[in-house]
Image (tube, rainbow, N blue to C red):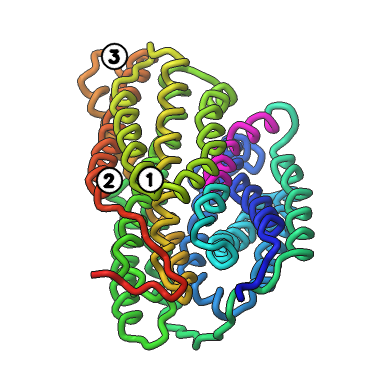
Amino acid sequence: MKKQYNTRAILTALLICGAVGMFNETSLNIALTNLMDVFQVSAATAQWLTTGFLLTLGILMPMSGLLLQTFSTRKLFISSVVSLIIGTLIAALAFNFEMLMFARVLQAVGMGLLLPLMFNITLVIYPPEKRGEAMGLIALVIMVAPASGPTIGGLLIEYLTWHYIFWLSLPFLVIGLLIGLKYLENVTDVTKPRIDLLSVALSTIGFGGVVFGFSKAGEGSEGWGSAVVVTSIIVGLVALVLFILRQNSMRDPMMNLSVFKYPMYVVGLLLIMSCMLISMSSTIILPMFLQTGTGMSVFITGLMLLPGSALSGIIQPYVGRLFDKYGPKWLVIPGLVILTVMLWFFSTISPASSMAFIIALHIGLTIGIAMIWTPAQTNGLNQLPPELYPHGTAVMNTLQQVGGAIGTAVAISILTGGMEKYLHGSSDPTKQTEIANAIASGSHNVFLFAMVIALINLIIGFFIRRVVVSREAVHPTH
């Protein structure tokens, strides 16, 4: 008989800590200019507060499958949340850049452990027919918390100081930890697989190199021709090829790549990666367009993007319930159509476009992503047998980070290229109206690129079908 868990309390603990962690990931972005003045550092140095966070996630996520099998659920949960609490406390007390940077790495270590753990626990404690709603709640946290970060961060910086971003987070993390200590049980089997140091090294260099290379290219200051960017990506890709060969030759791999034998998992993974790429592209480009193109303040920009982010989060649990009832196809395909149409309209915006029009488009964009994300992810993971859950979540979370880094870098490059082309043909390239038109031109190219990705996904979406989960381990279908 399957053991009964207090699923509501366990998920509450995970969601509270996950929400705070995701909020911390983006809330500091809005304070970077402020921090450059406070700590007297350059933009490239300040950017490390974001790059370092992403890099730590990129290195740790691939190891999460191994860690989930090596340590008990409670140990991993406590370690991840304590790392988040200590990191957040140090950040709140930080009096120099190095101290804040160290705190960010500790926060990223906590999130790198917590995110895969959250998915894995959900797959174990919820039966397949109820997973959609639970995954919808997780998606709510993953989407709304980072989206609200810049708005709340901007408000705190305007009326208090950047330290309060972290002071605000601390009590919630402590509450989440206390709920987890009371209700979270050890739900996974500890098999203690042999740790292959070569796999760990190749994974670290591979995923770390790729994420770092794309992150540096995405900063805009380096560019694709930079020796640092090119070297990082090439070394990372070579290490990844060696890592894949190593995993396929091992009897007990660190990251079991046999998850790719399950077609619905692969379809779900492609859709999730693309959604992350489109989401990160629009999250970077839209605020730049609103601030430089239309002259809006940081705070007003944050407020304009809040309705779409909040609404997409609110509907996630309902999307999950609809998935549980009807399966993925009737959500994913309409979601992709909405996404494609919204991106097309986004490619027509100009400095003269009304606020209401841009807010409506952003709401449509986030709802489209919400309709794809939970069904694609849950359906894909449902096809895996329980022993592959840790590996399936590790691969999915890792490639989401890679997709996000690629999306950011490509978006910045396309935007910069479009702006330069427009200003090159301008009679007065220093005029403010021409700069606004240039950023609109560059933004159009980014949204057209994202629309092409969405159209490719629409074709992939027609191959999705509901996974029927039996009580026995699911076998790959050919």
Instruction: Name the one closer to the observer, 128 or 239.
Output: 128
Q: Residue furthest front?
A: 1
Picture coordinates of residue 126 (x, y %)?
57, 62
Instruction: Name the one closer to the observer, 345 or 213.
Output: 345
Sequence-first disc among 3 and 2: 3
Q: Nearer the viewer, mark 3 or mark 2?
A: 2
Identity of the residue drawn at 42% across and 44% down: 219
Residue interval drawn in magenta: 138-157
Q: Which residue is mark 2?
A: 457
Sequence-first disc among 1 and 2: 1
Q: Quadrant of the N terminus?
A: bottom right
Residue 117, image quadrant:
bottom right
Q: Secondary structure at mark 3?
A: loop
> Label 3 is placed on what type of residue?
Asp
Sequence-first disc among 3 and 1: 1
Q: Secondary structure at mark 1?
A: helix
Q: Which residue is mark 1?
A: 275
Indicate yes or no whether the magenta region holds residue 153: yes
Identity of the residue drawn at 33% across and 81% down: 246
